[in-house]
């Protein structure tokens, strides 16, 4: 009878695990679920202690129970139960804390530092412009889900927070396909969704709106999210902003990432931002990178033959590799520290209760059905620097962006125009 509740609970988790261990683990980001596990760990722990004490009292004679060996076994069992349930409780609390800090929809807007005063998103608050967001929620469970992943480069040496990584991930849960589109950071002189033209680079749009709130009808991060969706012709449902400095810590906690560098990197201008001499080199071929080297791998763009486009492809590779390592046994052993680093690094307006769905979607996709593209040539061009005041910029060729949007998103693309209806045959005369 005392074992029955434990068996029922074990059966419940076995059924939950049928959807995949990763999906089960992701449910811990749902605060209600994590609180339930925390409460369950306490209640079941007390129940198990009562069962152990009850068994101890009912077995053998009083003299036998007084023997040191018997009492040592009792003490050992108590320590094991208390320790294991305390560990479950600790992990549950780590998920609750991380969820409240990562998912900005869980809490209201909080005060934040100015860009450049601290790495963004900051642990102290939602960071500049990180309110509850205004996501376009998919109408049904079978609808396409599109997320903007943006890497924020806001080290202490910078005077503003720059969105140096702009990666759009779009899932089609029906066709079981996914699209990864990277937008070059130097994209400039583009039309705004609310009218007008932004002549700066797209990586400074969020900081610009933060500094001039009246320049946009939306918050800084919503402006960036809607603008990227406007340019690609597809509504973006959610954003996830990643602070690159804390991203480095996440990679170190999982023991590094594995990459296959397609060509030699020799960037003499790379700034390590920690006082080390400038320059980053990496030979072609497979490498295991720690956090510091992985960050250089995704930030470097000044080497011979390198640019925003080659860097964006490397960013996609590192994100996929990090996701694999986080789901590995090595990643699980570092879970509390990893969750804390993730809470310092990530802010998203994705509702926490949708995380299991997203994890389930991601794990069900065949890598062969993932389309990757960097919107460099032939989707953009570089105007002569003499016409841009000597600033290196790129400009999208919107006709080609529209064609790509229709190819990937079909009738869901804002650029799609239904074919003109054929004129009805006129009635025949007498």
Image (cartoon, rainbow, N blue to C red):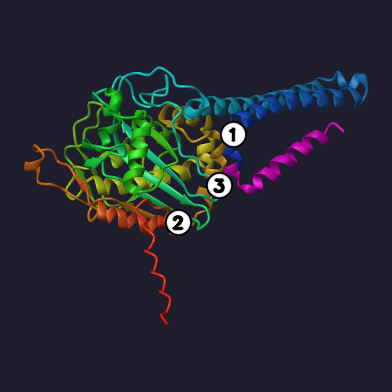
Regarding mark 1 in the picture, which secondary structure is present there? Answer: helix
Can you tell which of label 2 and label 3 is closer to the viewer?
A: 3
- Separation of residues labelled 1 and 2 (CA atoms): 26 Å
In the rendered structure, which segment of residues is drawn in magenta? 1-23
In the rendered structure, which disc, 2 or 3, sits on the residue that comes first in sequence? 3
Circle 1 sits on which residue?
Answer: 28
Regarding mark 3 in the picture, which secondary structure is present there? Answer: loop
Circle 2 sits on which residue?
Answer: 367
Can you see residue 288? no
Q: Residues within 10 Å of mark 2 (few under 14, many from 20)?
A: few
Q: How far across and down, in percent of the image, does residue 82 sit?
A: 70, 23
Regarding mark 2 in the picture, which secondary structure is present there? Answer: helix
Can you see residue 414? yes
Q: Nearer the viewer, residue 266 or 101?
A: 101
Q: How far across and down, in percent of the image, does residue 59 sit?
A: 90, 27
Q: Residues within 10 Å of mark 3 (few under 14, many from 20)?
A: few
- Separation of residues labelled 3 and 1 (CA atoms): 23 Å
**Above or below for 180 versus 90:** below
Q: Nearer the viewer, residue 411 or 319?
A: 411
Q: Is residue 321 left or right of residue 379?
A: right
Q: Is residue 2 magenta?
A: yes
Circle 3 sits on which residue?
Answer: 140
Q: Residue at x 27, y 23 (%)?
A: 211
Query: Which quadrant of the figure contains the N terminus?
Result: top right
Q: Residue at x 38, y 19 (%)?
A: 112
Q: Residue furthest right?
A: 61
Q: Nearer the viewer, residue 69 or 412?
A: 412
Q: Is residue 306 magenta?
A: no
Q: How far across and down, in percent of the image, does residue 397 sit?
A: 23, 52
């Amino acid at each position: 009878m005392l074992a029955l509740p434990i068996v029922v609970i074990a059966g419940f988790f076995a059924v939950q695990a049928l959807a995949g261990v990763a999906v089960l683990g992701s449910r811990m980001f749902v605060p209600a679920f994590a609180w339930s596990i925390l409460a369950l760990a306490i209640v079941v722990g007390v129940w198990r202690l009562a069962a152990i004490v009850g068994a101890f009292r009912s077995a053998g004679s009083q003299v036998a129970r007084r023997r040191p060996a018997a009492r040592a076994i009792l003490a050992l069992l108590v320590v094991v139960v208390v320790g294991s349930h305390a560990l479950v409780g600790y992990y549950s609390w780590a998920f609750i804390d991380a969820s409240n800090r990562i998912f900005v929809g869980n809490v209201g807007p909080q005060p934040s530092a100015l860009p450049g005063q601290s790495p963004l998103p900051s642990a102290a608050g939602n960071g500049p412009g990180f309110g509850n967001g205004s996501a376009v929620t998919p109408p049904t469970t079978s609808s396409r889900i599109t997320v903007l992943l943006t890497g924020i480069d806001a080290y202490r040496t910078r005077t503003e927070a720059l969105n140096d990584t702009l990666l759009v991930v779009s899932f089609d849960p029906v066709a079981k396909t996914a699209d990864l589109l990277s937008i070059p950071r130097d994209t400039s002189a583009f039309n705004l969704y609310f009218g007008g033209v932004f002549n700066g680079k797209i990586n400074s749009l969020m900081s610009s709106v933060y500094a001039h709130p009246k320049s946009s009808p939306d918050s800084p991060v919503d402006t960036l999210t809607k603008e990227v969706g406007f340019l690609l012709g597809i509504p973006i449902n959610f954003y996830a902003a990643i602070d690159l400095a804390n991203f480095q810590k996440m990679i170190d906690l999982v023991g590094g990432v594995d990459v296959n560098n397609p060509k030699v990197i020799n960037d003499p201008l790379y700034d390590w931002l920690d006082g080390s001499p400038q320059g980053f080199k990496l030979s072609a071929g497979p490498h295991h990178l720690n956090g510091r080297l992985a960050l250089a791998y995704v930030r470097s763009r000044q080497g011979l033959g390198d640019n925003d486009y080659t860097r964006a492809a490397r960013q996609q590779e590192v994100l996929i590799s990090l996701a694999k390592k986080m789901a590995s046994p090595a990643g699980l052993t570092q879970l509390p520290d990893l969750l804390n680093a993730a809470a310092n690094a990530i802010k998203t307006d994705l509702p926490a209760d949708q995380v299991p769905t997203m994890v389930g979607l991601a794990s069900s996709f065949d890598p062969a059905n993932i389309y990757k593209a960097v919107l460099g040539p032939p989707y953009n061009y570089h105007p002569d620097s003499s016409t841009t005041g000597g600033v290196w910029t790129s400009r999208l060729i919107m006709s080609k962006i529209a064609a790509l949007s229709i190819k990937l998103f079909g009738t869901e693309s804002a650029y799609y125009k239904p074919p003109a209806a054929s004129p009805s045959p006129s009635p025949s005369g007498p």
